[in-house]
Structures are given as C-alpha cells and as structure tokens.
Image (cartoon, grey):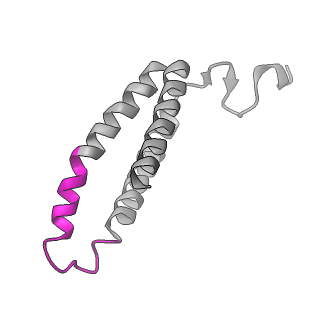
Amino acid sequence: MTASLITVVLLGCMLLWILAWQRGSRFAIGVVVGAFLALGAGPLFRAIGAAGPMPVWVPALPFALIALGLFAFGLLAWFWGDERPQRLHGIERTGQPESLTAE
C-alpha cells in the first residue's frame, strides 16, 4: 500500500513538472532545484529535531523570519518608492492607463 501511494504521488509530481516545463522552462528548473534542496535538507532537519528537547521559540521562528523579511521589503519600498519614473509601461503615476485619462 505504501509503495503504491508513493508511486502515485511521484507520478503526479512528474505530470505537474511536465506541465511546468511546457509553461516555462525557468520555472521547471526552479522546481527541480527546490526539490533537490528539500531532499538534501530533509535529513539535516531530522537530525536537528532528534537532538533533544526543542526550545519553545523554534516552532515560531519561520513566522518571525517571514514577518521580518516583509518588514524589510516594506522599508525598502518606503524609502525607494518615490524614486520611480513618472511613467512606467504606459501607466501614469495616478494608476490609470493612458487611454482612460482625460487630456
């Protein structure tokens, strides 16, 4: 039963990868790189988890890192936001496309 479940999951992942390759090869290559990184990091995380008692702050660490990353990107957008060009890809700074603005 377990082997057939693993086979079905792997075939499903392979079909999804084939669809990703048809849509864009850069995305499919990124999926492969991410899969190899996950395969390499899995045993490392298992070894860390089996090392002993886990501190109470460790489970919340990914959420804290994501929140800090979003905060950092928000700060960058805050400071760099006014330095963008007045016209970008046919859209005025007002947010309306050129065809909708009154002349």
Q: Decide if residue 52 is on the left or right side of residue 10.
A: left
Q: Could you tell me which quadrant the C terminus lies in? A: top right
Q: Residue at x 52, y 31 (%)?
A: 15
Residue at figure coordinates x 76%, y 30% from the top left: 96
Which of the pair 35/2 is nearer the observer?
2
In the rendered image, residue 1 lying in the magenta stretch gets the answer no
Is residue 38 shown left or right of residue 19?
Answer: left
Name the residue: 34% across, 60% down: 65
Residue at left offset 82%, top offset 19%: 99
Expressed as whole percent of the image width and height from the top left, the position of residue 67 reads 41, 60
Q: Quadrant of residue 40?
A: top left
Q: Residue furthest left?
A: 51
Q: Quadrant of residue 85?
A: top right
Q: Which residues are magenta?
A: 40-59
From the top left corner, tell me how far across and down residue 29 is, in percent: 38, 25
Residue 8 at x, y = what percent? 49, 43
Classify 46 as above or below 9: below
Question: In the displayed structure, does residue 19 sit left or right of residue 66?
Answer: right
Q: Nearer the viewer, residue 29 or 15?
A: 15
Quadrant location of the N terminus? Answer: bottom left
Is 53 placed above or below 49 here? below
- Whether 2 is drawn above or below 40: the answer is below
Residue 41 percent location from the top left of the image: 23, 50
Q: Does residue 88 appear to the left or right of 64 in the view shown?
A: right
Report the number of numbered marks. Answer: 0
Q: 50 and 76: which one is in front? A: 50
Give yes or no for residue 58 being in the magenta stretch.
Answer: yes
